[in-house]
Image: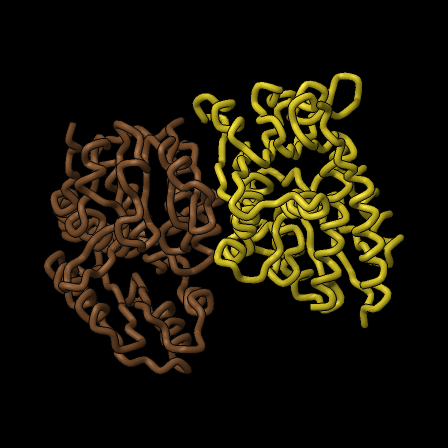
Chain colours: A yellow, B brown
Amino acid sequence: MTARTIDGRAIAAALRAELADRVAAAPVRPCLAVVVPTDDEGTAWYVRQLRRTAERLGVECRVIGPPVPAERLVAELTALSADPGVHGVLCQTPLPAGLTPVEVGLAIDVAKDVDGANPLSAGLLAAGAPAYAPATAAAVLAILRAEAVPLAGRHAVVVGRSTVVGRPAATLLLAQQATVTVCHSRTADLAEHTRRADVLVAAVGRAGLIGAAHVAPGAVVVDVGTNPTADGGLVGDVRTEEVAEVAAAITPVPGGVGPVTTAVLLSQVVAAATA
Amino acid sequence: MTARTIDGRAIAAALRAELADRVAAAPVRPCLAVVVPTDDEGTAWYVRQLRRTAERLGVECRVIGPPVPAERLVAELTALSADPGVHGVLCQTPLPAGLTPVEVGLAIDVAKDVDGANPLSAGLLAAGAPAYAPATAAAVLAILRAEAVPLAGRHAVVVGRSTVVGRPAATLLLAQQATVTVCHSRTADLAEHTRRADVLVAAVGRAGLIGAAHVAPGAVVVDVGTNPTADGGLVGDVRTEEVAEVAAAITPVPGGVGPVTTAVLLSQVVAAATA
């Protein structure tokens, strides 16, 4: 058996097509403000890509910085949160020294927090109240929905407990009535847990952590890892070829969660603009 | 084998003794405001108990209501949050019709949110930032700490996903480096999951849901359920006698999580007063 490769680019394209219609029908032009506090090549590349995708869909993308000095960052995010012309506010990492993700997230109004950076957004989501999840976590769910993977009553195992992926993915899976296990670096016998998963989400950032021995026959595997390789490439947390012999379906890296994340982020901007 | 019965009353007494010392050393007299929006016999009984325990420890307990009309409740909580003489603010359930727990929680300042009702408190906790957890969830952890139950790398299974117990208990267990599974009413084959737990937390509110077949030999079982019986008594979610034949240790109902919850709540008030 060889697993079906889940085509993240196709899922993203379908989301963008739907989004273009919503933008066309929107009474205002949605606007995303992207604050880039520090110089970082990867971030700069990502922001250029995001801006290009946004503008093709008719979403304005206002880029602030780099740099934005540490002492002005919170004020900048607060001002953008108060600006009626801005519908979504996103702050890129890495953050300047001396600022924590919590301090930065708290400066983004929940109604515009399209990447779920404010801890209040996380708390509201956990309480079942409306809020935006971090786009990467929401992309995991968008992929499972696009693939019609059943979740209610099924066992989802999330490897990784970051506030940007692991935890919010667990919250979203729980909201879909899955039984959810969160594993992490301190988990004893990781494979013992992951082998019980109907749906396995790998979000640790360790290249090739998950092998065939970690996966149950027929599981759906979503690989959130994006680990740079020595030759300038990108690999996931999953040994894809090996796991493909066991799993029913698997997202590749690149071309899996990544493109869907951008589409989901922009769909949250459009939702914020039309809320 | 018969499980050790965990003595919640003794753990609570030890916490109160420690607390009395902290109150005596505090530069101010800690003050908890308890808002009781609606008439309810169980709530009234609990508030009287809480007040008595608080005052014995030197913690002032200011009870507001019942009733507090729905249209004044948020303003009342906001005013207490702003009152420098009040260190902890607690709103009792049941809430008046038309108000959600989220709306009510948001009115309590995080610095005084000693029962973790504000979704921001939940989000901060999940992000590893300082905040108060709901006292019941914190009591589960206080019991495990008092019993020196190892958590790092162990598998904790929480049955129940409420915002007052199940979810915050999962967050706190994860912070102690446990691998955490959250089960709930939609979980397929509950026993299959719970039988894998080193630590099992039952917090569903269904009398006798957990039997011997749900528990691994040697597990530690914390029973958060408080289900009224026809004869005016109280039973937990766990069939205690049956499970005691399998588990290593178990909390009884009553006399387990309940008394510890009150002690933990007051310790959070003292922490808020001396922060």
| Residue found at the far right of this picture | A56
Task: Tell me if I can see residue B22 in this picture.
Answer: no
Quarter of the figure that contains the N terminus of chain B = top left
Q: Is residue A148 above or below residue A217?
A: below
Work out whether residue A148 can be spotted.
Answer: yes
Using residue B265 as the reference point, say whether residue A174 is left or right of it: right
Residue at (50%, 41%) from the top-left corner? A180
In-front residue for pair B27/A102: A102
Percent of width and height locating residue B11: 16, 43
Residue B53, percent across and down?
Answer: 14, 59
Residue B272 occupies quadrant: bottom left
Instruction: Between residue B182 and residue B189, name the one nearer to us.
Output: B189
Query: Residue, x 43% and y 32% (percent of image)?
Result: B179
* Quadrant in the picture for residue A57: bottom right
Q: How many marks?
A: 0
**Measured along the vertical axis of the image, is residue A270 above or below residue B152?**
below
**At which x and y percent is residue A174?**
52, 48
Q: Is residue B34 left or right of residue B168?
A: left
Asked if residue B245 lies left or right of residue B141, the reply is left
Q: Position of residue B185 (x, y in %)?
A: 43, 51
Say whether residue B200 is left or right of residue B170.
left
Q: Name the residue at 20% across, 49% down.
A: B260
Residue in front for this viewpoint, B108 or B257: B257
